[in-house]
């Protein structure tokens, strides 16, 4: 059964480790992540962006697929199904569809409007037993070839949003989605420290987990980060393994054209990436 992410993240914050949120794109992604979490006895969060939800055939399809796998693959570790960077309408759709957690990303609104909408969604999510993440300070990334450096959130605004009763908070600390540019200045631990001082026990979320070096990840965890989102890294690993299979001409040998064979190396690559991250985040054995 899906669970809210609140308890697993409160435990992670108290135990000084982080739980990975791995974004899913299809059945292979979902199965690889769930099986790895089970094998390593780690809690896990499956992230679904609005685009990925649409791609997979809608939120209800995703809920059906994930619930089916939990049962039929005997997944007993805590698993949360979480809407990633949801807009206002998507949050309500996921609450209805059977997600166990949502993120409302109101970071592009003026702070007053972000506060107002977040407050309303906190009540709606909690009423149905879901956990909710909010965001302060937009997280940069590549858009049409222009790479934003990643804003740093205002710690006072973080405190304001934390006080609305959100279960965990994403705050920009110079992190960005996708690959980091060569001239990236790194995470702002000064900002993170200031945010944690004001928000106390609230688990903090680090987006853009792809490509952040292990020493920065460890330092971020020591300063209160309890959830780390990874998406691009699984995509890169999947693409490289699939490319290798095709370039080696394996699809042309015997029944190598069988989709289950074509997608197998990519699925294994996702498993290897998830394992590496769970080791780095310290969540193994914490289920
Ligand atoms: P990356 O794609 O950089 O790993 O970021 C993932 C993320 O933050 C999803 O919200």
Image (tube, rainbow, N blue to C red):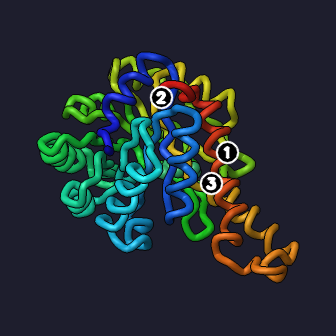
| Residue 251 visible within the image | yes
Which residue is at the front of the view, 201 or 136? 201
* Residue for point 77% across, 70% down: 243
> How far, Cα to Cα, is label 2 from label 1?
16 Å
Residue 65: x and y in percent read 39, 61
SS at badge 3:
helix
Q: Mark 1 packing: few (<14 Cα in 10 Å), some, or many (20+)?
A: some
Tell me which label, 2 or 1, sits earlier in the chain. 1
Tell me which label, 3 or 2, sits earlier in the chain. 2
| Residue denoted by label 3 | 234
Which residue is at the front of the view, 236 or 238? 238
Tell me which label, 1 or 3, sits earlier in the chain. 1
| Residue denoted by label 2 | 225
| Residue 112 visible within the image | no
**Looking at the image, residue 93 lies above or below residue 176:** below
> How far, Cα to Cα, is label 1 from label 3?
11 Å
Of labels 3 and 2, the one closer to you: 3
* Residue for point 57% across, 70% down: 144
């Amino acid at each position: 059964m899906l669970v809210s992410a609140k308890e697993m993240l409160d435990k992670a914050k108290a135990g000084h480790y982080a739980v990975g949120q791995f974004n899913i794109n299809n059945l292979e992604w979902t199965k690889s992540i769930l099986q790895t979490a089970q094998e390593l006895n780690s809690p896990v969060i499956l992230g679904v962006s609005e685009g990925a939800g649409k791609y997979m055939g809608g939120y209800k399809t995703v809920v059906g697929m994930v619930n089916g796998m939990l049962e039929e693959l005997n997944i007993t570790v805590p698993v949360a199904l979480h809407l990633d960077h949801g807009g206002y309408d998507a949050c309500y759709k996921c609450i209805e569809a059977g997600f166990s957690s949502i993120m409302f990303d109101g970071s592009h609104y003026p702070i007053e409007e972000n506060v107002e909408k977040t407050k309303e969604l906190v009540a709606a999510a909690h009423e149905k037993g879901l956990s909710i993440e909010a965001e302060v300070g937009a997280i940069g990334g590549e858009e049409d070839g222009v790479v934003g450096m990643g804003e740093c959130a205002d710690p006072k605004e973080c405190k304001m949003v934390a006080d609305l009763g959100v279960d965990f908070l994403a705050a920009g600390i110079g992190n960005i989605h996708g690959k980091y540019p060569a001239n990236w200045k790194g995470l702002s631990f000064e900002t993170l420290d200031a945010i944690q001082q004001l928000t106390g026990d609230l688990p903090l979320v680090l987006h853009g987990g792809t490509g952040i070096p292990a020493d920065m990840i460890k330092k971020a965890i020591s300063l209160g980060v309890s959830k780390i989102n990874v998406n691009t890294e699984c995509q890169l690993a999947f693409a490289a393994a699939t490319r290798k299979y095709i370039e080696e001409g394996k699809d042309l040998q015997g029944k190598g054209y069988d989709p289950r064979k074509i997608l197998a190396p990519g699925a294994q690559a996702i498993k290897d990436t998830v394992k590496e991250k769970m080791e780095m985040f310290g969540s193994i054995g914490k289920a």
